[in-house]
Image (cartoon, grey):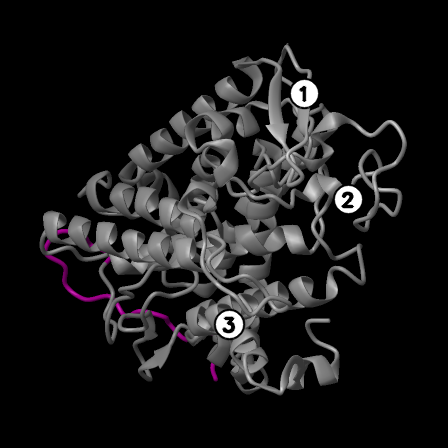
Amino acid sequence: MRTELAMYEPIKSTDDGDQWREKKDIESASSLQISSHHRPYLSSDKERLVSLDVFRGLTVTLMILVDDVGGIFPAINHSPWDGVTLADLVMPFFLFIVGVSLAFAYKNLSCKYAATRKALLRSFKLLSLGLFLQGGFIHGLNNLTYGIDIEKIRLMGILQRIAIAYLVAALCEIWFKGNHNVTSELSMIKKYKFHWVVAFVITTTYLSMLYGLYVPDWEYQDQGSTTFLVKCGVRGNTGPGCNAVGMLDRMLLGIHHLYRKPVYARTKQCSIYSPHNGPLPPGAPSWCQAPFDPEGLLSSLMATVTCLVGLHYGHIIIHFKDHKRRLNQWILRSFCLLMLGLALDLFGMHLNKPLYTLSYVCVTAGASGFLFSTIYLMVDVYGYKRASLVLQWMGIHALPIYVLIACNLVFLIIHGFYWKKPINNLLHLIGIGK
C-alpha cells in the first residue's frame, strides 16, 4: 500500500470546500459503537478507516485485560486515588474515539433537527443499557438471583458517561460549527471556535465547583446499617472523603444510588493489603466504606472535554488529506496536552480519574492522541492491516463484546446451567466465579 494514500478525495462542495468522497458516514459515534451502519472509508479502494476500528478494538482488549487481571497485578489496576495506571486510560480512550467518530457522523447535515433527534435517541439508548448492565439488576457470578430495589439502583456508569459526552459533543457539532471554508489550521480553529468555548465553559464550571464549593460534614450507613460521620467542613479538598464531586452526587443522585465499592477502599488508609482490598487498618478514616461513584455527574461533565478533543482530531482528518500534515498536527497537540497535564500535576492539580481532574484530562487526551497517531501511521499509512485484523474485528463489534464479556453476561448465562447443585457448573470447574 502506497504511503501517500489519500483518505478522502476532494469533491465539489456546496457549503464547505473540504468535503470528501466516502462510502458512507459514521452514524454511530458511541465509543462502544451503538450501530455499525455508517463508518469512515478510504475513497480510493473503498476500504475502511481501519485505524479507528483498531484503536477501538485495542481499547476493548485493554478493558477486558484490566478487569480480569487488574486484581492480580495492581500496577495495571485502577489507581486507588491519585495517579494514572493502564486501567485509568481505558475510559479516556473510549471518549476520544467518540469524538473522532462524531467528526464523520455529522460532516454533512441535511436537517439539524433530525440529527438532534437521532443524537438524543442514541444517548437515551446508551443510558438505558448502562442502567440495566451496571445498575445492580444483574447480581454477579456468585449469585444466580437477579433484580434490584429501585431505591438502591446505581444511576451512573460507564455507558451513561459515554452517553453524556456523546450528546454534548454531538450537539456542538450539529449546532455550533461555522460555514466558512477551511484552508489552514487557523481557519479550522475559527470554524469550530464555539466548540472550544463550550470546552472552556465546562472546564471553568468544573474547576469552580471542585475548588469553590463548601463540603459540610455528612453521614452514611454501611451495609450493616451502622452510621458513620464523615467530618469535612472544607472547601477545595480533593481527597476521597470531602471533595465536591462526591458531595454533588450525594445531593443530586442520592447516596443510595452511588457505587458501593469505591476505588479508594484500596488505599493505605483503608486497607492493610493496599493496593489490594483488605480489612480496615486501625484508625481508618470514617469514609473508607462510603459509597462513591467513579462515573458521577460532575466528573462526567468534565469527561465531555476529552470527547471534544477527539472531535478536534477528527476535524483534522476531515479537512486535511495529507498524511504528514495530519500526523504533524496530531503529534504537536498531543505533546502540548501531555506537557500541560504533567505541569498541572506538578503544581498540585493531581492526576485523578475518580474526580476526572483537568490534569488527568490533558494527560490522557495527549496519550490518546499519540496512540491514535501511531495506529494511523502503521495501519492506514503503511498498510499493516493483516496484523491488526483481530483488533479491527473487535472494534467493529465493540458493544456486543462489552455487553457479553466485560459485563460478564456470557459468564452469567453459562453459570446458570448446573448439575444438581448451583456449585456444579462449568465456570466453577475451571476456576471462574469462585
Tell me, for residue 164, which label it has, or none: none
- Answer whether residue 283 is visible to the viewer in this image: yes
Q: Amino acid at mark 1?
A: Leu
Q: Which residues are magenta?
A: 1-18
Residue 293 located left or right of residue 272: left
Whichever of callouts 1 and 2 sits on the residue coming sooner in the sequence is 1
Q: Nearer the viewer, residue 326 or 199?
A: 199
Mark 2 crowdedness (10 Å alpha carbons): few <14, some 14-19, many ≥20 = many
Residue that carries the numbered disc 1 in the rendered image: 229
Q: Of helix, strand and loop, which one carries label 2?
A: helix
Whether residue 241 is in magenta: the answer is: no
Residue 179 located left or right of residue 416: left
Vertical position of residue 217 compared to residue 185: above or below:
above
Residue 187 located left or right of residue 340: left
Mark nearest the camera among 3 and 1 is: 1
Q: Position of residue 222 (x, y in %)?
A: 65, 36
Mark 1 crowdedness (10 Å alpha carbons): few <14, some 14-19, many ≥20 = some
In the rendered image, the quadrant that contains the C terminus is bottom right
- Answer whether residue 376 is visible to the viewer in this image: no
What secondary structure predominates along the stretch shown in magenta? loop
Residue 283 located left or right of residue 185: right
Residue that carries the numbered disc 2 in the rendered image: 266
